[in-house]
Image (cartoon, rainbow, N blue to C red):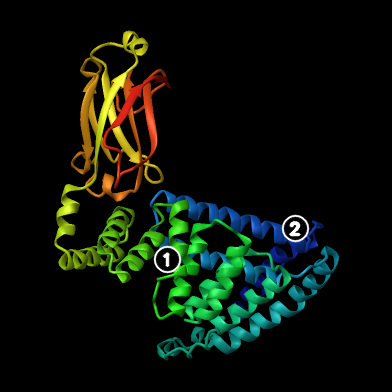
Amino acid sequence: MSFWIAVVVLLALALIILLLPLMRSSPVQSDPQRQQQNVQIAREKKALLEAQLADGEIDQTSFDSAYLDLQTALALELEVQETKSEKSRGKWMAVVVVLIIPAISVAMYLYYGEYRVIENPELARIAPRQQTASAPQMTIDEMIAAIKQRLRDNPEDAEGWFMLGRTFMGKQQYGEAVAAFQRSNDLLANEPGIMFALADALAMQNNGSLLGEPEALVKRGLELAPSFPNGLWLAGMAAEQRQDYAAAHRYWTRLVPLITDNAASLQEVKNLIAMLETRDPNLATSETVGAALSLLVDITAELKARADPAAEVFIYAKAMQGPPMPLAAKRLQLSDLPASLTLSDADAMMPNMKLSSFDQVIVGARVSSSGKPVAQAGDFYTELEAVDSNDPPEQIVLTIDRVK
């Protein structure tokens, strides 16, 4: 008897806790407000994913997968939102809580629980009932239907079309994927990720061939984002299919330092590079030599007169688009200028980050007022952008003439 008294008391406490919020008068957000909040949350999550991708915390594959999940969740959430008024919610929810919850709770306990164990502990040794089957998960087809409905309501949603294309790619429905990616590309021009996805879908539709329109899309995308991992991968595949093994070797070599946090992908790319070097042994030799820049470094007479002759001079090359740390660097003293020198892969700051890994680089020289490699206000410097590391000028002249 004491057991059932405890049950009644606990149910009463639970009802009080549940009813208090319902009886308070607080406005419920309208459906448009909830939609705006969901869209804003999705945008913030997207920005976080893009930041993680830019910082190298995740690779392109992980980004695409997480971005697809985010878009799907947003689309489904927008589909199921309903508008409710506070007055009706408080009234009817209170009725549900008071009348139905106690009845359901007791009924479920009588069916699923083992209240008889209190009087007969031996029953605890009997195997529990099998759990009922879990609710079915949404299928890919249902997900596609939800996304399509969302796009019918908002046909200008470029990200929604991109998500639909990714879903069709997962189902190997390449024709539908091409149509979705093309629509996304039409709505959001000059977006490298969409170009690469469309190129991939076109290739798969054409039995894996990247030649022709797919390769043209890849090249346009790489002009906008030279260090986009998926673009470098596809460009290497296209070059390999054209039997231009030297170009494929360059693309995949540039890809290596960008995927060091993904062991499986890194090993796959290294295997492909090794395969190319087996076909053409000269490729391995060219990689050993690597890229090299011939420099002539000097400083204007005015700035030279204002600096200590023993001041440190840092000469460096860094990627136009990519990690901020130098790809190659050397150190001189101001008294050494003018000086001729060479920056090459042998001067790499990190083994996996070399001049030959990037097509275009920034070359610069800086007189450090603090003696430290990190730039400080008051340093004298100069920089030259968009230097082709694969086909550089015969000599690059750097004249230090600016003050930071």
Towards the viewer: 230 or 47:
230
Give the quadrant of residue 11. Answer: bottom right
Q: Is residue 249 left or right of residue 60?
A: left
Q: Identify the amino acid type marked 2.
A: Gln
Question: Does residue 165 appear in this view?
Answer: yes
Q: How many marks?
A: 2
Q: Residue, x 32% and y 21% (percent of image)?
A: 368
10 Å crowding of disc 1: few (<14), some (14-19), many (20+): many
Q: Please provide percent x and percent y for residue 58.
A: 40, 57
Q: Under tag 2, what secondary structure?
A: helix
Residue under the image location 39 percent in, 19 percent down: 401
**Residue for badge 1:** 215
The answer to whether residue 353 shows anywhere in this view is no
Compared to residue 181, the image places residue 392 above or below, namely: above
Q: Nearer the viewer, mark 2 or mark 1?
A: 1
Mark 2–mark 1 distance (CA, rounded to whole Å): 44 Å
Q: Nearer the viewer, residue 33 or 358?
A: 358
Query: Which residue is more in the foreground, 78 or 129?
Result: 78
Task: Check contact, mark 2 vs mark 1: CB within 8 A.
Answer: no
What number is the disc on residue 33?
Answer: 2
- Choose top left, top right, bottom left or bottom right for residue 127: bottom left
